[in-house]
Image (cartoon, coloured by chain):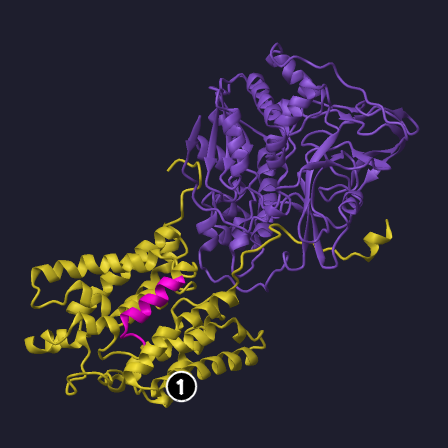
Chain colours: A yellow, B purple
């Protein structure tokens, strides 16, 4: 053998030898970046304190992951950015001016019970941020449904969310709910959920860089329009319009950030259509007929549970195989 | 004739990097001092040596004869003296027996009789292709005459020429089309005649506008050959994908192109057929692209079969400081080399030298179930699931999910954000399933 080959260290590994730009870490931090618009809208409409809520959530999510990983003597994975995302997501779906102590509790639950108990990122069944929020909803129902009006609200008396107005309010209150306010975010609601335009911008960004598969959000929107449209056309005075359903509550936020979570959503394209459609069906049922004004959180958590079943039954037909 | 066609589902868009060599004309490397010519450069039985140590041979002389039905003869690629017949490093990764020839000062060449492409018949074409030792240039190195002799019950009605060259970096086929347009088309017509078909399709990707333009001009008066231009996407050049894109026919799992009436040949093969018939040349050279950002002077080169990798790399200015990986073939499916003494084979399409940045890989994480591997799999398999089942040694389950259908194109692993070596696991699963299937057949 020549000297040339003796001194040379050549890498050997299986094909392919080149790799796309994306890896887990880059994708996660891109999602963090995409969360800037909803963070800004939350701070503008409800005040800078909301950033403190989000910060608390982030710190406790990362801390919980670190402690659990450390105790289990597992590699520390906080740099993959996923706990950071769960932290921001949980913070943004809490009511404005939420207690920092309760926020911290929610964050610990989100990471501890939502993710690490299953073995960490990639193994969890339910969306961690939604697990955190569901826990808080059960533990602190009053605080979780205490809404403040936005900094720009004309009517300073009522701080009910548009969906609870539709559920519990009178006709006069209903007429006060305008689409444009919902679109920009000048309505009561969770910190990061009210501004449809901010979430839309983030969603388009995530779809463009292919972190979000467009099928799930589109399936959700179509399904929401179909099912809520049926009731709206039967009685427009009683039921909210499909557009209002779309722009209010946690729907947009859920469609962009929660239902599209890689780990807890289906892997097949066909599965994503079924999953998205199922979420919206449950949302419509809960919002129009359930005891709660809002249902996105439960709808997604319920459909999370069906994901293994959906995956198994939506296996694509192998190329060239008879159907 | 010209058709615009729709694509296959899945696939990926790696950075092409063809600009490194696309505009460099094909050069011939200076005569190497020695060549090492493996007896096995094709799928099938190795050739049987006809020469002994010390024999004096001429370029073009048969030095090993074919053995059995699926095999090809091997020819001396330089004139000189046989200095060794022993086991040598091989591009496939496992060492194989080879004949070493030390080149003499004076080079002479023996050729076969030139034949008139207008008068020759199908049997004569196949016989000449066999005598010239031609193997497929598309990667698998299947003996060309075998591919042109399908069993009588398979009705073949179409020849497809794979001009997609879908592997990033490689530009050999592109250069051959541009520099030898009319030879290439004559080669295609000879292949059509040998296959007994009236119709030929040349499948090419739209990232080669210059080649498309030249072919369109050259084919303007040809009724029998169609040019099919597809939107660039890897792995367009995979036989199943190319056949589907060009004709809409789908080759079922476990079947061959001839089961849907198609024979696929490649650009390099077509040119080699022209040389064998019109110029009487056996296959003693390989036209290769030497490229990547780890080599100082990338080139398109004609090298004698058996030229060692290190000789080729030296001719191209040597490796750069940050060279990390030497690959025989393209970056998606090529074989990584652990040393540089192995020789270039008849079917070698290129040597790719990636620098550290090009070969970079992030750390592996747990599967995030993002489904990207499923989305990009051109054969609609479930790569992450198959890899997992292989890892768990659940080979029967992997078999049921079609692990043996995988063609290892690497789209899944290219796209995987968790950097899971999906192809590696799936390859392992395939091997184990084949083993189980063989045992089952015996029982």
| Relative side of B373 to B165, left or right | left
**Residue B415 in magenta?**
no
| Relative side of A104 to B204, left or right | left
| Relative side of B139 to A116, left or right | right
Looking at the image, which residue is at 48% across and 70% down? A29
Observer-nearest residue: B151 or B183? B183
**Residue A193 in magenta?**
yes
Please state the horizontal and vertical placement of residue B364, each as a whole percent of the image.
Answer: 58, 63
Please state the horizontal and vertical placement of residue A296, each as a whole percent of the image.
Answer: 27, 69
Quarter that holds the N terminus of chain B: top left
Q: Where is residue A9, by image quadrant? A: bottom right
Observer-nearest residue: A166 or B118? B118
Q: Which residues are magenta?
A: A192-206
Q: Where is residue B68, by image quadrant? A: top right
* Above or below, B337 relative to A92: above
As drawn, the residue found furthest toward the top would be B119
Quarter that holds the C terminus of chain B: top right
Residue at label 1?
A: A104
Looking at the image, which residue is at 6% across and 75% down? A171
Please state the horizontal and vertical placement of residue B100, each as a whole percent of the image.
Answer: 85, 34
| Relative side of B72 to A7, left or right | left
The reply to whether residue B254 is in sight is no
Please state the horizontal and vertical placement of residue B121, each as a whole percent of the image.
Answer: 60, 11
The reply to whether residue B31 is in sight is yes
* Above or below, B239 relative to A179: above
* Above or below, A15 relative to B57: below
Q: Residues within 10 Å of mark 1 (few under 14, many from 20)?
A: many
Magenta: main secondary structure = helix
What's the chain of the residue with tag 1?
A
Identify the element where label 1 is drawn: helix
């Amino acid at each position: 053998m020549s000297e040339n080959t003796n001194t040379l260290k050549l890498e050997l590994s299986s094909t392919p030898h080149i790799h796309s730009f994306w890896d887990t870490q880059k994708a996660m931090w891109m999602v963090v970046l995409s969360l800037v618009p909803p963070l800004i809208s939350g701070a503008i409409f409800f005040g800078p304190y909301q950033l403190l809520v989000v910060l608390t959530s982030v710190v406790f999510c990362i801390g919980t992951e670190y402690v659990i990983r450390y105790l289990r003597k597992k590699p520390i994975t906080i740099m993959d950015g996923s706990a950071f995302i769960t932290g921001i997501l949980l913070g943004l779906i809490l009511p404005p001016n939420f207690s920092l102590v309760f926020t911290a509790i929610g964050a610990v639950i989100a990471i501890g019970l939502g993710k690490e108990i299953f073995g960490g990122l990639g193994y969890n069944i339910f969306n961690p941020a939604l697990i955190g929020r569901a826990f808080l909803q059960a533990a602190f129902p009053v605080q979780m449904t205490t809404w403040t009006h936005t900094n720009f609200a004309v009517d300073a008396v009522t701080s009910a969310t548009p969906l609870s107005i539709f559920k519990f309010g009178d006709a006069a209150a209903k007429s006060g709910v305008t689409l444009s306010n919902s679109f920009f975010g000048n309505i009561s609601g969770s910190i990061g959920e009210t501004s449809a335009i901010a979430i839309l911008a983030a969603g388009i960004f995530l779809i463009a860089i292919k972190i979000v598969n467009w099928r799930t959000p589109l399936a959700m929107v179509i399904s929401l329009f179909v099912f809520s449209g049926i009731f709206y056309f039967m009685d427009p005075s009683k039921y909210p319009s499909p557009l209002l359903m779309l722009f209010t509550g946690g729907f947009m936020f859920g469609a962009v950030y929660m239902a599209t979570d890689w780990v807890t959503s289906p892997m097949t394209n066909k599965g994503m259509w079924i999953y998205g459609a199922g979420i919206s069906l449950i949302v419509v049922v809960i919002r129009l007929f359930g005891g709660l004004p809002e249902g996105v959180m439960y709808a997604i958590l319920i459909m999370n549970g069906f994901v293994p079943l959906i995956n198994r039954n939506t296996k694509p037909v192998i190329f060239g195989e008879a159907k | 004739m010209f058709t615009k066609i729709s694509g296959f589902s899945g696939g990926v868009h790696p950075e092409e990097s063809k600009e490194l060599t696309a505009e460099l004309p094909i050069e011939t490397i200076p005569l190497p001092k020695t060549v090492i010519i493996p007896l096995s450069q094709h799928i099938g039985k190795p050739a049987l040596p006809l020469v002994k140590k010390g024999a004096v041979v001429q370029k073009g002389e048969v030095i090993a004869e074919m053995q059995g039905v699926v095999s090809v003869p091997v020819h001396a690629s330089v004139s000189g003296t046989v200095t060794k017949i022993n086991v040598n490093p091989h591009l496939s990764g496992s060492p194989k027996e080879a004949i070493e020839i030390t080149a003499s000062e004076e080079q002479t060449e023996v050729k076969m009789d030139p034949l008139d492409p207008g008068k020759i018949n199908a049997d004569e074409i196949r016989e000449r292709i066999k005598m010239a030792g031609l193997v497929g240039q598309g990667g698998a190195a299947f003996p060309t005459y075998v591919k042109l002799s399908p069993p009588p019950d398979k009705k073949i009605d179409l020849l497809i020429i794979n001009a997609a060259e879908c592997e990033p970096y490689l530009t050999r086929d592109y250069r051959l089309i541009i520099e030898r347009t009319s030879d290439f088309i004559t080669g295609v017509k000879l292949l059509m005649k040998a296959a007994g078909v009236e119709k030929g399709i040349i499948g090419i990707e739209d990232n080669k506008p210059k080649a498309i333009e030249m072919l369109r001009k050259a084919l303007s008066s040809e009724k029998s050959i169609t040019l099919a231009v597809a939107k660039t996407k890897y792995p367009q050049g995979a036989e199943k994908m190319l056949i589907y894109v060009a004709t809409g026919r789908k080759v079922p799992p476990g079947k061959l192109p001839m089961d849907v009436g198609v024979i696929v040949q490649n650009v390099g093969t077509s040119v080699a057929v022209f040389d064998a018939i019109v110029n009487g040349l056996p296959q003693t050279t390989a036209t290769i692209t030497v490229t990547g950002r780890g080599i100082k002077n990338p080139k398109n080169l004609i090298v004698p079969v058996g030229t060692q990798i290190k000789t080729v790399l030296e001719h191209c200015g040597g490796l750069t400081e940050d060279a990390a990986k030497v690959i025989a073939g393209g970056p998606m499916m090529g074989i990584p080399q652990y040393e540089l003494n192995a020789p270039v084979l008849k079917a070698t399409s290129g040597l790719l030298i990636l620098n550290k940045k090009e070969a970079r890989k992030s750390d592996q994480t747990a599967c995030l179930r993002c489904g990207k591997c499923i989305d990009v799999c051109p054969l609609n398999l479930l790569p992450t699931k198959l890899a997992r089942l292989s890892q768990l040694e659940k080979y029967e389950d992997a078999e049921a999910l079609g692990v043996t259908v995988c063609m290892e194109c690497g789209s899944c692993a290219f796209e995987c954000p968790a950097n899971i070596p999906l192809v590696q696991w799936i390859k392992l699963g395939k091997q184990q399933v084949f083993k189980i299937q063989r045992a089952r057949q015996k029982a």
